[in-house]
Amino acid sequence: MVSLKLKFRPSIVEGKQGTLYYQLICNRRVRQLATDFRIFADEWDPQSEQIIINASSPRAGYLESVAWTVKHCLERFRSVVGEYTFDGRPISVERVVEVLKSTSDANTLFEYMEQTVRHYQRLGQLRTGETYAATLSSFRRFRGGVDVALGDIDCTLFEDYEGYLKRRGLSPNTRTFYLKHLRTAYRRAVEEELVVDRKPFRRVSTATERTAKRAIPLQLIRRLKQMDCSDLPAFGFARDMFLFSFYTRGMSFVDIAYLQKKNLKDGVLSYRRKKTNQQLTIRWEPCMQEILDRYAADSSSPYLFAIISAKTRNPRRQYQNTQSRINRSLKQLGEMMGLSLPLTMYCARHSWASIARDRGVPISVISQGMGHDSEKTTRIYLASLRTEVIDRANRKILSLL
């Protein structure tokens, strides 16, 4: 008797991720084989012994990738066992382990993308891992779940994929998002000498279109600041988070949510951007303190704002849910103000850069805000500036409110 089942071992620490492993029974010998996959208890169905995938969850892409890998592994196992049974050959535990190991080798595009997702997860770069998982999910749907060997990838494959994305009505920038991540993964596979470069992306477009303007003028930010939201606390919180982002030169909400008390010292806020790991410092202004006074975390929390609970098992999910609520409230506030564009947290960053440029702040200080075709250029400009120059520019803008 030979059988292989996927099992889940919960963490001994409440709220932490548990481990997925295979239970192998071969010739009455039982062996447990570890995997690199980690899931939460509520993502596992003990009755069906299957992974639960909630399409609205931010981990859906990752869980789909894990589920597909497990399915592929079990199919490969059954295939090999069937071959041995048909030939009448005995199969050993060692041979089964060898088969399972071979399924983890990145010889196909799906497998290599899954390996890439796990690589970024181990590095703690969860957002990057999620983008590769989302790309893999899209490409897997295009292929109908049929994998492709790295050596079989050619121009026609990605031409067909680009056509599939167009037929689904995806915007040029969304198509570019998926194609660029596939291209990056393929180039990495080439560097690792897993495949010879056949330049399969030369017939598809990976150009990025300039996005629609997302900045709002200073007078509208003044109106937003002066709005009475005392009877609508959800609107008030969303408005204040938008203003705090604007006050801090367009700080992204993920960085606001993860700010810790140790980041604020001697009137200076220092933090690293989650997206780029760039170190930024901002002079702490009274308008920032006013917002912190309203939403400060309690004394037992390491966080600056009461956005992420110190006891939560998944801070990333918590901040993402909060961000979604904030953006819904901001959209409604924008409609109340008669804005033609949806108001979101990201508008604060565009607005600061646009207002700074229009008020004569040197281009070198703001790198024209969102005027560049890539954020890389913006980071290069900002990284070369002295902190006090940026602080003077920020103070100049805040004094206008």
Image: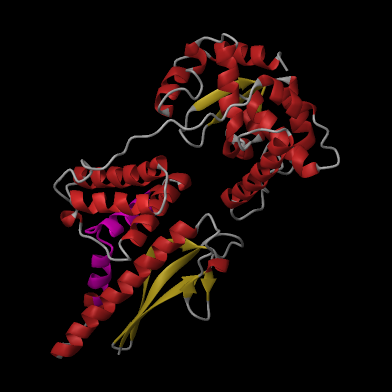
The question of residue 111 being in magenta is answered with: yes
Q: Quadrant of residue 207?
A: top left
Picture quarter with the N terminus: bottom left
Q: Is residue 163 left or right of residue 60?
A: left
Quadrant in the rendering for residue 72: bottom left
**In this rendering, is residue 28 above or below 120?**
below
Residue 29: percent from left, percent from top: 32, 84
Q: Say whether residue 109 is magenta.
A: yes
Relative to residue 111, is residue 278 drawn left or right? right
Q: Residue at x 75, y 26 (%)?
A: 223
| Foreground of the two, 355 or 211 | 211
Relative to 23, say whether 363 is above or below. above
Q: Nearer the viewer, residue 34 or 73?
A: 73
Closer to us: 217 or 90: 217
How far from the left and from the top, in percent, is residue 308? 66, 46
Find the magenta span and give its range. Answer: 96-119
The single residue placed furthest to the right in the displayed view is: 231
- Position of the C terminus, as image quadrant, is top right
Q: Residue at x 45, y 33 (%)?
A: 276
Left or right: 138 in relation to 328: left
Q: Position of residue 275 (x, y in %)?
A: 48, 36
Reply above or below: 337 against 280. below
